[in-house]
Image (cartoon, rainbow, N blue to C red):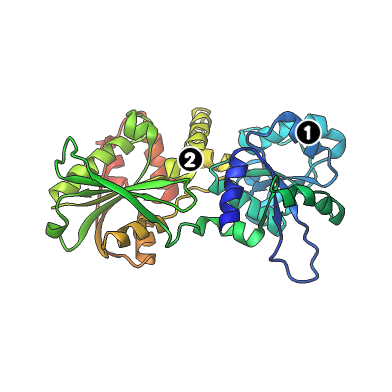
């Protein structure tokens, strides 16, 4: 686990890592790969990798489909044409993160990514980077040439198995760090309990409302994904801020319970990528398509930390405040009994109508009541 956590931080700093394949069947040639995140990569570094005959651009299936390609799996590798390395630099950046066509003269046909390359994209998503990587498939000579840097600690190696399971790092290892009474504008009796994931990258807060000894048997609970733009600044692009404040008041009115404030900005893609997605939405894409152009799925959130937080608070049976059926399923799968659901709406406005419509039509959110109110 320690090596994987270090790899995540190195990638966020733009530092290359080596991923060793430890999952392929014996006798199957599957080399280690030197991995550089496309995001934040300097032109000279990118050009250096593009000049290598074994250089590849690795993208998710979502991004490849948006480029008009038809990958046979959820990610694939595009070989770089060494003769076009100079021109490839800007094209790689556009292909990875923008609504731009792919210059097919610069890349070969996509083929399945190796085990190590698949693991590289998992690390990118965990690190909240664009899920796109430049990789160099290392032959034995190249691997030996890097060994001095590896032995000195200048270059980190991580196994593909560990990297692919990087989203499970926090499972069962969430740490309760600190807590304090925090009176709120609408609720006088509230306590904030902070939990930290073991890699230190994400912190989540449980807002404990009311007296736990007086809570209903079916504890009112809201899983609220952090939204800096909506929760703090009152963005009109979403209804998150209104849902947050309404949830606090509703939980208090139901006799008290818990709001879990989860560090899952932008449905789990992080603030930087959320802002990139907003730019794509301004070009005419809906919220789901914008995320997929960047290479993400329609919802990258995982709720194992919510299950662990509820367990730490001794909550086994809940009444969930949500319009999202996937949250109901996630808690149930984690062993939390979901005794009922409480709908929770913000205002429908001209600015957020397209966003809410996409959530309903593309992601199955239960928003018919609020959307139909616009037609009355």
Q: Are marks 1 and 2 in contact (CB under 8 Å)?
A: no
Quadrant in the picture for the C terminus: top left
Assign a secondary structure to mark 2. loop
Image mark for residue 84: none
Residue 121 appears in the picture as rendered? yes
- Residue at 44% from the left image edge and 52% from the top image edge: 197
368 lies left or right of 293: left
Assign a secondary structure to mark 1. helix
Quadrant in the picture for the N terminus: bottom right
Q: Position of residue 374 (x, y in %)?
A: 28, 35
Camera-side residue of 94 and 72: 94
Q: How far apart are the two marked residues, 1 and 2, measured between alpha carbons? A: 27 Å
- 125 relative to 304, above or below: above
Q: Position of residue 126 (x, y in %)?
A: 54, 49
265 lies left or right of 191: right
- Residue at 56% from the left image edge and 51% from the top image edge: 5
- 22 relative to 15, above or below: below
Residue 101 appears in the picture as rendered? no
92 lies left or right of 359: right
The residue lying furthest to the bottom in this view is: 26
- Residue 336 occupies quadrant: bottom left
Q: Residues within 10 Å of mark 2 (few under 14, many from 20)?
A: many
Camera-side residue of 62 and 40: 40
Mark 2 highlights which residue? Answer: 270
Q: Position of residue 347 (x, y in %)?
A: 27, 35
Image mark for residue 47: 1
Q: Earlier in the sequence, mark 1 or mark 2?
A: 1
Q: Position of residue 375 (x, y in %)?
A: 28, 36
């Amino acid at each position: 686990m320690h090596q994987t956590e270090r790899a995540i931080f190195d990638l966020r700093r733009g530092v290359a890592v080596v991923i060793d394949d430890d999952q392929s069947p014996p006798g199957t040639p599957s080399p280690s790969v030197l991995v550089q995140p496309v995001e934040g990569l300097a032109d000279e570094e990118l050009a250096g990798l593009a000049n290598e005959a074994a250089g590849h651009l690795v993208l998710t299936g979502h991004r490849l489909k948006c480029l008009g390609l038809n990958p046979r799996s959820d990610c694939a590798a595009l070989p770089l044409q060494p003769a076009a390395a100079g021109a490839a630099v800007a094209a790689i950046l556009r292909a990875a993160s923008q609504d731009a066509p792919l210059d097919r003269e610069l890349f070969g046909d996509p083929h399945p990514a190796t085990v190590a390359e698949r693991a590289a994209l998992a690390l990118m998503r965990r690190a909240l980077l664009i899920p796109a990587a430049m990789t160099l498939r290392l032959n034995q000579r190249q691997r030996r040439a890097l060994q001095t840097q590896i032995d000195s600690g200048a270059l980190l190696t991580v196994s593909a198995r560990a990297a692919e399971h990087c989203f499970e790092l926090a499972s069962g290892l969430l740490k309760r760090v600190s807590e304090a009474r925090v009176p709120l504008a609408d609720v006088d009796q509230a306590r904030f309990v902070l939990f930290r994931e073991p890699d230190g990258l994400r912190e989540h807060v449980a807002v404990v409302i009311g007296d736990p000894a007086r809570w209903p048997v079916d504890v009112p609970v809201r899983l609220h994904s952090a939204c800096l733009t909506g929760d703090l600044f009152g963005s009109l692009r979403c209804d998150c801020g209104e849902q947050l404040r309404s949830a606090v008041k509703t939980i208090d009115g139901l006799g008290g319970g818990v709001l879990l404030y989860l560090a899952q900005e932008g449905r789990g893609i992080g603030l930087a990528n959320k802002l990139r997605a907003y730019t794509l939405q301004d070009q005419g894409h809906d919220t789901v398509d914008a995320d997929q152009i960047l290479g993400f799925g329609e919802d990258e959130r995982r709720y194992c930390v919510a299950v662990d937080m509820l367990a730490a608070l001794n909550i086994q049976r809940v009444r969930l405040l949500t319009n999202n059926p996937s949250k109901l399923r996630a808690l149930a799968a984690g062993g939390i009994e979901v005794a009922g659901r409480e709908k929770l709406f913000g205002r429908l406005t001209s600015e957020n109508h397209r966003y809410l419509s996409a959530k309903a039509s593309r992601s199955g959110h239960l928003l018919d009541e609020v959307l139909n109110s616009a037609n009355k």
